[in-house]
Image (spheres, coloured by chain):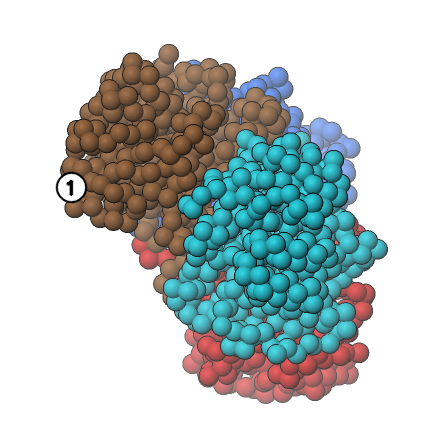
Chain colours: A brown, B blue, C red, D cyan
Amino acid sequence: MTGIRRAAVIGAGFMGSMHAAILGRAPGCELAAIVDPNLDLARTVAARTSAAKTYASHEELLANEKLDLVSICTPDNLHLAPALAVAKQGVNLFIEKPIASTVEDARAIIAATEAAGVKLGVGYLLRFDPRYGRAKELIDEGKLGRPIHVYARRNSARTEGPKRYGGKLPLALHVTVHDVDLALWLLEGQEPVSVYAQQTDILLGKSGTQDSIAAIVRFSGGTVVNFESAWSLPSGTRHMIDARMEIIGEDGFVEVQCGDSGLHFADATRSQEIDTQHWPERGGAIGGDLREQLHAVLEWLDGADRPIASGRDALRSLELTLAMIRSAETGDVVRLG
Amino acid sequence: MTGIRRAAVIGAGFMGSMHAAILGRAPGCELAAIVDPNLDLARTVAARTSAAKTYASHEELLANEKLDLVSICTPDNLHLAPALAVAKQGVNLFIEKPIASTVEDARAIIAATEAAGVKLGVGYLLRFDPRYGRAKELIDEGKLGRPIHVYARRNSARTEGPKRYGGKLPLALHVTVHDVDLALWLLEGQEPVSVYAQQTDILLGKSGTQDSIAAIVRFSGGTVVNFESAWSLPSGTRHMIDARMEIIGEDGFVEVQCGDSGLHFADATRSQEIDTQHWPERGGAIGGDLREQLHAVLEWLDGADRPIASGRDALRSLELTLAMIRSAETGDVVRLG
Amino acid sequence: MTGIRRAAVIGAGFMGSMHAAILGRAPGCELAAIVDPNLDLARTVAARTSAAKTYASHEELLANEKLDLVSICTPDNLHLAPALAVAKQGVNLFIEKPIASTVEDARAIIAATEAAGVKLGVGYLLRFDPRYGRAKELIDEGKLGRPIHVYARRNSARTEGPKRYGGKLPLALHVTVHDVDLALWLLEGQEPVSVYAQQTDILLGKSGTQDSIAAIVRFSGGTVVNFESAWSLPSGTRHMIDARMEIIGEDGFVEVQCGDSGLHFADATRSQEIDTQHWPERGGAIGGDLREQLHAVLEWLDGADRPIASGRDALRSLELTLAMIRSAETGDVVRLG
Amino acid sequence: MTGIRRAAVIGAGFMGSMHAAILGRAPGCELAAIVDPNLDLARTVAARTSAAKTYASHEELLANEKLDLVSICTPDNLHLAPALAVAKQGVNLFIEKPIASTVEDARAIIAATEAAGVKLGVGYLLRFDPRYGRAKELIDEGKLGRPIHVYARRNSARTEGPKRYGGKLPLALHVTVHDVDLALWLLEGQEPVSVYAQQTDILLGKSGTQDSIAAIVRFSGGTVVNFESAWSLPSGTRHMIDARMEIIGEDGFVEVQCGDSGLHFADATRSQEIDTQHWPERGGAIGGDLREQLHAVLEWLDGADRPIASGRDALRSLELTLAMIRSAETGDVVRLG
């Protein structure tokens, strides 16, 4: 370890508060500050972590703190301004997924970090899930041979989207983009050549999002990937997130199954799986994939090779996901590349 | 029961031998004869059942036997001739799925049975599976409300297709067509409006079939169905058939899961699920969905209301499946209706 | 088939009404009458089946009907009187499990049927479940080699026992006895040599039954069987019956899993498995294991070899189960044989 | 963090090499040395970690290094001597489970650490598994109410025991003891009052261990726990470790399921679950429960409250496990306390 890293988190919402909780306890890291225009919220989060200070804007943060890392957890469409400012200051950046809500913003962020010579990572935490991570290794070790067909699911209750993002985002950009990043990562060396999608919005259309999206992407090496995201399971569903990925290769097959989590609870009225994967809290500390990822970010700042999604990776998954949405909206196949 | 029904089976292959085994033991049924151009095969099957006679052709059969029911289990593209002859003779018909390999054949068969005033049923046995069957009832009872999103899988080992049909059929017509029939049945009242599909043939293309097909169908009522058939799992897979169907409705959700069958066997070299659903053999008798279906056929001949796929049902699933194949071959969306 | 069999059902409760529904539709069977001291109940059941007549007592039944089979579905402790009368009349008997609630009653019933030269079968329907049935065959075929260790579970919600039998029976005699019969059947040729059990009654003790029982039985061939029955899962549990059996043999392993049934339903408040095994109803007809068993009884009357539990089989499972209860009550090991 | 902790590992076998790999990368820890009488083995392990030095004995280690922590990973029956020496030197101790193979050794180790005023932790890593850990929290939060019935399984292939410990240990002391520790931890405040067990040794008896053990323990508060450990699954089994724990309480139910790990692999010959829980290796680093535990040990040295099994906890689980073995050997109930 090369000394203590000073970090700040911009955005004190759902993800930002977890970033702060993890960075505030991470070895080799000092959580310098939390930033949110809602200063009360920033203070609440700071009080639960070791963060000494709070600021209402990234300008104030950058004017007052010398930092090694800034984690940006603002709403997707508000990543650009803080990212450009942080990069300009010569500070490394970690941005929650997707990198931005438009390709233009994503490109500007990448350009700014390249110009400034700072690192840029994007929060595709599932690369740090032991199941997806080991699946990637099995592919890289040649255990599957050439991938042929992939199925990637990410379903959840109809109450989760509205709760997490007010139901105001395209489902694909919030949810499917995780599997898009994983597919691009797992199928390293292949480019998407076409995408077709259909979505439904019977339940959640009125709140500005979709019930489900199904998409089929063909890749340059002949692999076909079938994506399914349906955040419209009834509220009594046993699953928090029913995520699966199955990869059929020429020589082998691997199945990641995250829906049945290994921990089930029932009482007089409910029967449900309890998440032990993404960001389980135990004894006040956040664990799971999110912690793995943020610890890996700190090691990567120190030069370690870690599978953190780069800005260019995130641009690719954003482009493919936006094409998927375009197909769903028009009903036509979108040809890529 | 209105007396003993005399039945014959044409085609003494994989399915025909099971039809014979079941009809030969069915209460209220006398299995009169087995027909196959390969008379040795016909005799082998007859010897294992109560069938007294064997014939080399349907002409001989019809010239010699007075029948109430003929079950046609010849290869898909050889259904037409025996079906027309049987109908002309005024005998009821049961034909293995799909009804035929072309729309023209299917229409001709339907026309012949309608002209002759005989019954025509088609072998979509999964309607008689207790899981799919109860799912249909839950929808009909209104427990799910309006269906929104459906996922239908039917995966198997890469060795099953070549073993069952010599790998000489389009995968969709042999396999996906089961789920197409189920979807049309479950979504009664809706028409498919568009279909898009992608398939792969890296492993099995050389033997005239596909490794996998993924398809998305949009229906007139707004429901989207995502079909997946991948008969390319490695030969060591634990599943004989990994079939699932999940239906998200406005009010409820139902999941059919047939992959993990409830009976698992392992020894020094294998670990696999044993089928207890489709046509389990026990004590020499065939049980499961196939038996349920053929017993239901006998009751339906007697006037009972049973959910046997009609000729028109089978025509609809054939048309949609052929459109799916056309989309997969051209890469374009196929608009229907 | 050797003509139509005339059958009657004594006891019009939960099981009796299902026996009637099945026998009333069974090919080769005429359901002659339903008997219950509660004549209204008998009439309700008769109205839902093809039964023409109802009687308030077995004496009336036997005085008025010529029968081939009587199925006794009265409470366990009221099997004796009708069984003796039926046997004396020279009519074949099928009795719901357990054969009786005491060894004395069981012995008297067996003696009466042997004296009268009539058949006696007992309703251990799980022998007709395709999963347990195939497991038995795998053992008989030598696929497992010598059995070493067996685990047998049968858990359910705390509401099921009170609902089904008023909570007035020892849990082991109502529930565990199923697995005891299966174990004795699967381990054919071995005798139990000792049994130890512990039970709990924190929730259901006040209503005269137990929450759970765990038992360990050692057999003469060295096999150890671990039984677990806990009908005390919370009412929100996803399982109707979480039944499993796992058999480790010298050469192979087989696992029967009935808890996750392959059909799952969720809505705004619930998430639960739907039974498709024991006695699923569809379109007004009862299917599943119970129907398989009763159809097999009719074939067995005609001379077919079917794995119906005999009176002596049922005596063995009763004796072992009563020893299990004795151990649970005393806290001591009970040595057998 | 209160400065860098200097640690050493004694025993360079299966567990020792993993302890070294984890401690060698742990933040705030310097892995000073590896000790093994087989110096070549010690050097191999040291070469894969950051350990600078190797010693052939704990005497040499203690004569040459100033340490904060020694982890003892020698065979169970060789824990005593190094533990006493380390404690005498005033160095904190972490000992792999079980603390020792006899109660006398365990008591001597505890006494030595208490006399020396050093910390003593024992390696019951499953307390750090997110599933068992969250189950404990659910109980402590009152979500289950009073525990009534517990089932605890830990099954594995017949090849695992011989591979891991040469088949030379009682199965219960190597395997079941994990669940015994968990049960005592989860049922905090209750004492075991009786234990009964039966074991089999048909396959592995000749190599000095057992195929399976089943045990029933009654606790002072009325809870009954059913333990099952069968390390005799065939070598083709899909499970590395099929571990489960189910706890039925007055108000709720929790199920931990570790057998189906969420990562499944199949190829032409195999179909198996891949462990992602205990000590998954990824990119050369060991993760999972073992890493969680050893990181927690370092925090606990710094004063943090972590659920590390204490010496007294380990003595309790050892005593109960030895009583279980005694019961299995004699066939009698063993009364405790």
Residue at the image position 46 percent from the left and 60 percent from the top = D136
Point out the image quarter for the C terminus of chain D: bottom right
User: How many dots with numbers?
Assistant: 1
Q: Viewed as shown, does residue A83 lie left or right of B217?
A: left
Classify C239 as above or below A6: below
Residue C330 at what x, y percent from top left?
Answer: 64, 84
Q: Which three-letter amino acid code belongs to the residue tagged 1? A: Asn
Q: Chain of mark 1?
A: A
Residue C175 at what x, y percent from top left?
Answer: 58, 71
Q: Secondary structure at mark 1?
A: loop
Q: Viewed as shown, does residue B96 lie left or right of C270?
A: right
Foreground residue among B326 and D46:
D46
The residue where tag 1 is placed is A38
Foreground residue among D171 and A291:
A291
Residue C248 at what x, y percent from top left?
Answer: 71, 55
Whether residue D180 is visible: no
Residue C88 at what x, y percent from top left?
Answer: 70, 85
